[in-house]
Amino acid sequence: MLKDITFGQYFPGDSIIHKLDPRMKLILIIAYIVLLFVADGLFSLLIGASMVVVFYALSKLPWKLVIKCIKPIMPIILFTAVLNIFFVEGDPIFEWWIISISGKGVLTAVLMCIRIICLIAGSSLLTYTTTPIALTDGLERLMKPLQKIKVPVHELSMMMTIALRFIPTLIDETQKIMAAQKARGADMESGNVIEKAKALIPILIPLFVSAFRRADELALAMECRCYHGGEGRTRMKQLKLTAKDWAAALFVLCGYAAVILMNVYGPEVFRL
Amino acid sequence: MAESIIKTEGLSYVYSAGTPYEHRAIDDINIDIEKGSFVGLIGHTGSGKSTLIQHLNGLIKPTAGKVYVGGEDIWENPKDIRKFRFKVGLVFQYPEHQLFEETVYKDIAFGPKNMGLSENDINRRVREAAKHTGLTEEYLEKSPFELSGGEKRRVAIAGVLAMQPEVLILDEPTAGLDPKGREFILSEIKTYHERTGATIILVSHSMEDVARFASHVLIMNHSKVAMYGETREVFKRVDELCEMGLEVPQISRVFAKLREKGIDVPESVLTVAEAKEAVLKLLEKGGEANA
């Protein structure tokens, strides 16, 4: 049950996508998300969708991972679709009682659904193919210019690394504490909402206590190893942009060109 | 044979079945624990001890096989599983990490409260459990978070004792304590055993402790039961135990070596006190022979 919250978990592999520089992957994924919103018609959006399909094919990940990442946001997709179908105004194509559905509403709903699915699939691909450590490393490098305006970039990325590192530990801990309280007869399944919330107290308090204890111990251990922040810190893994990275950038750039061409010269049907 | 309190039949459990991480934690466990016995449970880390004990009070549902407590199949009616958790008290490793209440009293009362007892009963049980674990009145109103590690552990154990379980299972209750703390906890458990006649299952890495207290020993190896029997009988099998990479009590090993050298000492010596007797007897005999 608790394992389901690992939305976007690293999936080890050896593909070209896995080997891309995390900085490039981050930039490209942001570019890709923007692209999804630049596309203003069904055909240009399909170009965007086919890009994420190509990426997944290159990454050699099992296709069921796509379904796995879409599943948790299914309610949001459905909600968006329903809202758009019923509430976007336009020439009605279907009318019954107080319900009226316009062609524009249906189109908006379809486009929004494709957008959300591509968006989640794309960003999940990033976390599927990049270790959390590489990801924060990439983020730190990308945000480095912000140091000039006194943003504590290194500290932020260190905090992120630590948080990511301790998620599995805390899940483990939660399960242990839950078992221990159940052994004392704690009842977590029955009762109304308030009773259920109350039943969490015996789990949350020990969890907080242990999280603070761990934080204390970790801080001490880091100080023992002379950690003094980011200044003058060298890296074990140097990030280097290679031909692969530029090829990927070129691919996304071509995607942009195709989408913009489609926006300008494409057929006039299925447009917003 | 005495009445059986816990019995398992073909008990197996597989973690993460159907994934590449599949792991068979326990495999076809058949044990029958007598009422009132004191069982020492020994095995390497990862041999399935912790998984096994969590089956005995229904925290884990077995993949296959059955668990009987007092003759009843505990999973016959899954809704009633809590009943068995009160019958079979389980003290986890480092139990002090589960304390959460404002006062020691309230924390110990958590179990009895879940049982739905009256205030009076709860009060009586909390005080009894506190007494069993050597916690005096003044502790009861303190916050559990201001106590020392050893004291916290006593509070946590009292929290399980207060449910007055028929079977008490403890997973390495002395881990991380100093010698004085260890001795205290162990003698507490022994007193509880003697006073209430409850069945005890003690998971431990210390052969000495098991030899001193346990009437029976259960050895787990590679997810299976390797040996189960009376302490004396099990510790006679020095060679087999060593093959599994387990120790026997140091003193038993010394006496096994003495026997190898052809010195006539008893086969199963478990404690230093017994060893003393044996040596004195031998010296007496030797003295007579010389005379």
Image (tube, rainbow, N blue to C red):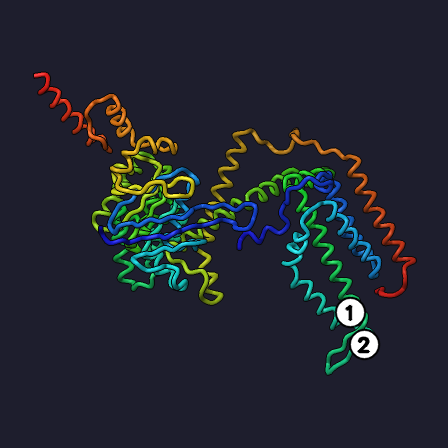
First along the sequence among labels 2 and 1: 2
Farthest residue, direction bottom: A97
Q: Which amino acid type corresponds to the residue marked 1 in the rendered image?
A: Val
Return the x and y of residue B287 as percentages of the image width and height.
10, 19
Q: Relative to residue A58, is residue B254 depicted above or below? A: above
Q: Is residue B62 left or right of residue A107?
A: left
Task: Specify whether residue A115 is in view.
Answer: yes
Q: Is residue B211 above or below residue A98?
A: above
Query: In the rendered view, does B274 fall on the left or right side of B41?
Result: left
**Image: B241 above or below A132:** above
Give the amino acid type for the residue marked by disc 2 in the picture.
Ile
Residue B137 in sight from this viewpoint: no
On the image, numbered disc 2 is attached to which residue?
A: A93
Q: Share a chain, discs 2 and 1?
A: yes
Q: Which residue corresponds to the image point at 43% horizontal and 50% vertical from the top-left?
A: B12
Location of the C terminus of chain B by quadrant is: top left
